[in-house]
Image: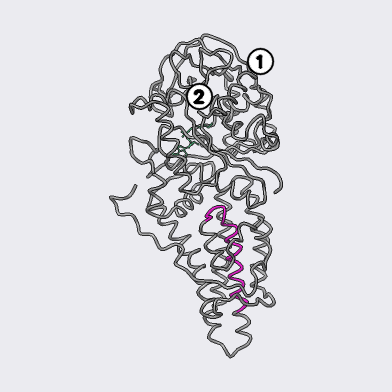
Amino acid sequence: MTKPFYITTPIFYVNAEPHIGHTYTSVITDTIARYHRLAGEDTFYLTGTDEHGDKISQAAEAKGQSTQAFADHIAGIFRSTWDELDFSYDRFIRTTEPAHIETVQHILQKVYDAGDIELREYSGQYCVGCERFLTDRDLDEEGRCKDHEKPPEERKETNYFFLMSRYTDWLAEHIEKNPGFIRPAGYAKEVLSMLRSDNGLEDLCISRPKERLQWGIPLPFDTDYVCYVWFDALINYLTGINYPDDPQFEERWSNVEHIIGKDILKPHGVFWPTILKAAGLPIYQHLNVHGFWNVDNRKVSKSLGNMISPLVMRERYGFECFRYFLLREMSFGRDASFSEEALVTRVNADLSKNLGNLESRCIKMLGRFREGIVPEPGAATELEKDLEALVKRIPITVDEQMRNMEPHRALASVFELVDATNKYIDQRAPWKLAKETDNAESMELLDKTLYSVCEMLRVISLLLAPFLPETASRILERLGLAGALEKAVLPQDAQAWGGLPVGNPTQTGDPLFPRLEMPAAEDAN
Ligand code: MSP
């Protein structure tokens, strides 16, 4: 283990059950975390639930439940769903945990002592969906919240304000001087335009009077108020690695990557760095912002009933097929459209036809022609040298793409290896060579071909492991390399041509990806 790597998902509101958007955020985080673990980094992946605020207490009330019971129930669903989907998180944090409450109060006190929190009277347009007062740019032409398409409520209150505007120039300068701090670049531009807008940055109301809202963390310097839910929620990233007591805190924190969806850019791109600055803490390494999934070209919403449950997708298609589609179809940062037809088409083309056929052709031929035992490769010819060159290059490209937060491109790079191997098999036509048993040269070429194809499969599996962990393990097992992932180090083990031991026993198995049927019209979504 070398340097620490710390990655976070947003923490999920407990007012809805896990859907495609939550799943995408988690699939990306899980994939990146798995990559860094395989790269030998001391990786910590944090996820959890965001449980305070008006929105949650209103949802509980609507169900006729106590807020705590309601939050416990939905937090439990998130946790068990993520467990069923085998997300490799290291900690599941809940903002109602005593440890988190303590951390929030600690930070609030620090910022208050630094003179960056002030009591003021305020009136404004409050959106319960966003859990914040809106500015003009958050409203559409009809004066409704752009995100929630609902008119905000007019609210007047005496509240505590975080003097965020003090940090406008500092933050703008930091973003300008550090390209990639917020990525992809379009989102950095968006944050800059929030900072540079005519009215500039406003101060942030961070309290709610207790008489109106009890479901929150009391301010340590005035217990008549509870903390605004976003101020509370962002701090989970510190609680998650035991700020301030853990001796590893500083090192981990200096390598933090946040993954978020574009709808929560402002809290993460503006509130969070300024809170950290005011609390005297270093700011994060990168804010990685993904786009939104539409389903059948419509916005995902409860009322349309098109939320897409990951467990239903698992049941229908297998989770790795769904996971593959999410990772491959969306260019990180942009929006994408989900439909079951598109999933079936892509999975059949990429996984059944390209990858699945490659694996089954390779292991079956080895069984048929060489009793399943990996043969001697002998000296490389031009064709093998081409494969070797690819194997030297692609793992480095994948490494760069993963570190630049371009998982869709990294996956496409891995599939370059799949395509090259399928092409190599067709060029060599081992089924023809196998018939020429009297020709020693053909037999040697057959061994070389079979070895090279299996070796390519080993490399492909190592690189595929962060994306499709179960598939990668299954292929490696069939190559007689069970347990290889526990020892592997990326990218170097994927680059090391010849890693597959001669004489390894292989075994055939069921098709990895049986062709999927198009959904019947009435089932679709
Ligand atoms: N609780 C806040 C985050 C606090 S982090 C300190 C929150 N929760 S959420 O449950 O509403 O959303 C969690 C994540 O799901 C966000 O990153 C959001 O962008 C993502 N998605 C929700 N719907 C989505 C799509 N339709 N598509 C892609 N991701 C979207 O926000």
As shown in the figure, which amino acid type bears the numbered disc 1? Asp
The CB of the residue at mark 2 lies under 8 Å from ligand 1: yes
Our reading of the magenta stretch's main secondary structure is: helix
What label does residue 136 carry, if any? none
Where residue 218 appears, as percent x and y from the top left, is 53, 18
Where residue 6 appears, as percent x and y from the top left, is 63, 40
Residue lying at 62% horizontally and 35% vertically, measured from the top left: 241
Residue 345 is left or right of residue 248, and the answer is left
Q: Residue furthest left?
A: 522
Disc 2, SS = helix
Q: Residue furthest bottom?
A: 438
Where residue 350 appears, as percent x and y from the top left, is 48, 60
Where 262 sits versus 429, above or below?
above
Per the model, the C-alpha gap separating discs 1 and 2 is 21 Å
Q: Residue 256 falls in which quadrant of the image?
A: top right
Residue 510 is left or right of residue 196, and the answer is left
**467 in the magenta segment:** yes
- Which is nearer the eye, 66 or 389? 66
The residue that label 2 is drawn on is 229
How many residues crowd mark 1 within 10 Å: few (<14), some (14–19), many (20+)?
few
Magenta-highlighted residues = 447-469
Label whose residue precedes the other's in the sequence (1 or 2)? 1
As shown in the figure, which amino acid type bears the numbered disc 2? Val
- Tell me if label 1 and label 2 are in contact, CB under 8 Å: no
